[in-house]
Amino acid sequence: RQARHFNLVLNAYAESRHERSGVMAERLLERMAELYKTTGDDIVKPELQSYNTVIKAHAKSKRKDSAKRAANILASMEAVPDKISYSSCIDAWSRSGERGAALKAERLLKEMNVLSEDGHLDCKPDRLTYNAVIHAWAMSGEQDAGEKSEQLLYQMQKLYRAGDKEMQPDTWTYNTVIHAYANSSGRGAARKALKVLKRMEAIHIAGDPNVTPDAYSYNSAMNGLAKSREIGSAQMAEDLLERMESLSPAGRYIKNVRNVPPTALRNVQPDQISYNTAIFAWANSGDMRAAAKAEAILQKMISAYQAGDETLKPDVTTYNSLITAWSKTPSAGAASAAEELLDRMFQLYDDGDKECLPDRQSFTSVINAWAKSRDPSKAKNAQRLLRRMNALLEAGYENLRPNVYVYGAVLNACAFTYGRKGVKEEAFTIAIETFQELNKSPYVSSNDVTYATFMRAVTTLAEKDDPRRDRLIEHVFRQCRKDGQVSAAVLKQLTMGAPHLFISLMPSTLGKKAVYGMVSLEDVPREWMRNVRQGRRSRSSEQQFKRNTF
């Protein structure tokens, strides 16, 4: 047995990409080290290649601790690390999804630069190394991820201009910087992604074949605009789509584009993702024209598909985004339009288009559309859709099993029902039935939102002298405490619906705080909040509750 034989097995582990491949490779490396320690025979001594392959195996496996294990191997290497050692470890951090991974990857890059400046040229980073660190920032979701990525791009450009030919940024570099901006929540990030895209276009038109904007470039920029919700971002996303159409080889929708040679930017053929992203941008915009704009883009997709372009076939994502656009439209008839789209999806599915089968999101968005409408029958329509889901579930459509968001949407329709006494009584009955069904389900449990929404429904729909009002609110709050789902929203609904019960339902240790309504989430026993999602326990929620107490 020789080191090269062990290395072959290590490489097999690394290439397998199995979840445990890194662990298995590490164990084999430990066995090599033990054999060398026992025999003293250099023929089995772990080589640089051995360590690098184990780090690579960790980088390609999907264990949560893979990056940490790779970093430990790098730190404990008896052989002197080289560029492959560092780059593989950086790759592990970029794939890990761990908080702080990008910062750790960049620290390794800086370490490589220091070593190479000190004469260790086998540690000198190249374009792939920088690209891996940029990718780590792009995947981090950090607010400043775009800026961090672009700073690294500037470093690459500076080094390339200084004569380092290995540092020339390529399409992948620019695309990842665009993705970093699109994936961050920083102010103005979407517009910065757009600027990087325009820079790509200019560089390519100037004659650089290594930087060629493609569909991914445009789709990433559009995705950033779609998520930004900034004023005008949806229109900019649609403008990008139209630019892709004008620059595509097929030239289906040619427009006048100045300063672009006929063969330039030829890889920007818009695809299904392009159109779906533009539709989502309008759905997420809050613009009064959103539904009409999104519908027009869908019609273009359908026309192109019917003309023979199978890459532009609308799917469930397309229709779900359009339904969402209608669900956020305040105009009369929006809910009916959303439900018509749902019916169209089922018709397409029945006609053989399996990619248009509605899912939970489809139903939830339609129910939300009814909830936001002014239709006095909104609660009845919401419950009808829930019943339809249950019937389809019994027929074998497992993807349509209602979840907590579906039940929450139905309760929301009830909670915001206004009108005559008979209408409110019907909605009250539906709210009770829905809440009971939710709590009897073996597949889903109430959360703080459904508790708060049901309490609001009771407050809105039951008269103050209705004995059911206090009884239900007290019962539900006690159950909410038991389930550990007391949030600021739940406390707010308690004070609005039954303020006279507040003192008796709060811990006796609060004393005058409860009497004078000075309670915040900080005063609530942790046991009562143990299952509330962290984001809904924020300080801002506590302050909001304080302002609304009594």
Image (cartoon, rainbow, N blue to C red):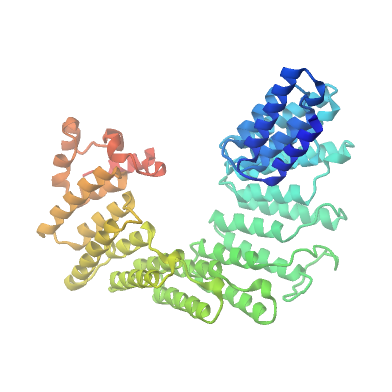
Residue 53 place in picture, x, y as percent: 74, 36
Relative to the observer, which residue lies in front, 273 or 531? Answer: 531
Residue at the image position 78 percent from the left and 57 percent from the top: 201
Residue at the image position 49 percent from the left and 79 percent from the top: 344
Residue 134 place in picture, x, y as percent: 69, 42
Q: Is residue 150 visible?
A: no
Establish if 430 lies above or below 148. Answer: below
Residue at the image position 66 percent from the left and 51 percent from the top: 193
Residue 451 place in picture, x, y as percent: 28, 52
Q: Total of numbered circles in the picture?
A: 0
Relative to the observer, which residue lies in front, 352 or 492? Answer: 352
Establish if 230 lies above or below 140. Answer: below
Residue at the image position 88 percent from the left and 36 percent from the top: 162
Query: For the C terminus, which image quadrant?
Result: top left
Residue 78 horizontal side relative to residue 352, left or right: right
Q: For residue 206, which quarter of the picture?
A: bottom right
Q: Is residue 399 visible?
A: yes
Residue 440 horizontal side relative to residue 191, left or right: left
Residue 356 horizontal side relative to residue 431, left or right: right
Query: For the N terminus, which image quadrant?
Result: top right
Residue 89 place in picture, x, y as percent: 69, 34
